[in-house]
Image (cartoon, rainbow, N blue to C red):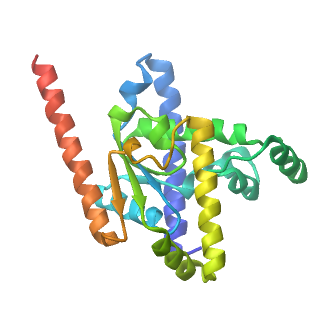
Amino acid sequence: MSERTAGVERVADHNLRNWAMAENARARLTKRKAQETVGPYLAISRELGTGGGEIASLVAQSLDWEVMDREIIDYMVEKYGTPRELVNYFDEKHTSWLEEVFDSWIQGQRFTESTYVHRLTRLLLLAANHGKVVIVGRGAAFLLPRSRGLSVRIVAPLDYRIEQVKRMRDATEKDARRLIDDSDRQRTEFIKSHFHHDACNVHEYDLVVNVEKIDPSDAVDLITTTVKTWLQKQGAETLVHEAQ
């Protein structure tokens, strides 16, 4: 783990702790509807081999927002004491009940896909209630109120993705194709099973970016500009509503 990555994880863990404390206080002091306290947020869905995680991180830096990706897993591991291998096993995946029982038995833990989704939901709501957060994958776009944030899908043709995975993971073309096929299937089944949406349906998103045609740095600029424009529009609409 690089020094930079370790630093990011420490910051994310610190933020999640603070957000949890603030959320507990908010629950005691107010009964406002959850939708009124959520956002702004940016949910970034991505295909394997598109560099979506890195793009999300750069967008967060550009906006001066927090980013939540693998930090969610880090927090689950520390807070609940669940082995990292077990959390990774269920992360953005849909498994059969037999696989759940078998793997949990092997690990000696009472941890299932339902447990993962329950804890994930709480953490996503916690982060979104804090606001100004970029959340990578994990169904955030389908869990959080759409009116309180933006959703982006980062895609690319299969051949492009295969080349990227080969380069990033030093994999053969066959292995890269298999990794992509498995990732696509698992993420699609996960979203359909728990959020009842089609992750591949472009109409589910506010913006779809094809990184084969758009350089990653340009993609960051495009997404950042879109978020800022949306925030300005939201602010203007709020002023009009208050004036009425």
Query: Is residue 84 in view from this perspective?
Result: yes
Residue nearer the viewer, 112 or 48: 48
Give the image quarter of residue 132.
top left
**136 relative position to 227: left or right:** right
Where residue 26 sits: x, y (%)?
46, 25
**80 relative position to 73: left or right:** right
**38 relative position to 78: left or right:** left
* Picture residue at 54% right of the left edge, 44% below the top: 17
Give the image quarter of residue 110.
top right
Q: Is residue 243 above or below residue 209?
A: above
Where residue 116 sits: x, y (%)?
68, 42
Where residue 121 sits: x, y (%)?
57, 37
Where residue 60 sits: x, y (%)?
36, 57
User: In what quadrant of the picture does the N terminus appear?
Assistant: bottom right
Q: Is residue 203 above or below residue 65?
A: above
User: In what quadrant of the picture does the C terminus appear?
Assistant: top left
